[in-house]
């Protein structure tokens, strides 16, 4: 399952864990995704949407 927003395409980003001894290891920052029933092209589908798209109104939720 891809951790990617179906609307804007936002996906995981890379960063670093830095310990007190300054040991650097790679970590991932995941987007805040939510599974939502939404209207897509006139039909209702379950899609994964990031909270930024959901809050900005790019998605029409269906009850």
Image (cartoon, rainbow, N blue to C red):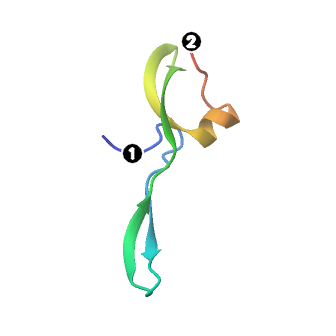
Q: Where is residue 23 in the image (x, y as percent from the top left)?
A: 39, 84
Q: Residue furthest bottom?
A: 21
Residue pictured at 49% horizontal, 49% vertical: 31
Q: Residue furthest front?
A: 20
Is 5 placed above or below 28 here? Answer: above
Q: Residue 34 carries which label?
A: none
Sort mark 1 into few (<14), some (14-19) or many (20+) by Cα contacts within 10 Å. Answer: some
The residue to which callout 1 is attached is: 3
Residue pictured at 37% horizontal, 72% vertical: 26
Sort mark 2 into few (<14), some (14-19) or many (20+) by Cα contacts within 10 Å. Answer: few
Please tell me whether mark 1 sits on a helix, a strand or a loop: loop
Q: Where is residue 30 in the image (x, y as percent from the top left)?
A: 45, 53
Q: Gap in Å between the C-alphas at discs 2 and 1?
A: 24 Å
Q: Which mark is residue 63?
A: 2
Is 58 positioned to the left or the right of 29 in the image? right
Q: Position of residue 39 (x, y in %)?
A: 53, 18
Please tell me whether mark 2 sits on a helix, a strand or a loop: loop
Residue pictured at 62% horizontal, 42% vertical: 52
Q: Nearer the viewer, residue 26 or 9?
A: 26
């Amino acid at each position: 399952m891809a951790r990617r927003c179906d609307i804007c395409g936002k996906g995981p980003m890379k960063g670093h864990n830095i310990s007190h001894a300054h040991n650097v290891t790679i970590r991932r920052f995941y987007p805040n995704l939510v599974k939502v029933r939404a209207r897509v092209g006139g039909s209702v589908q379950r899609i994964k949407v990031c909270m930024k798209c959901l809050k900005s109104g790019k998605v029409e939720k269906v009850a």
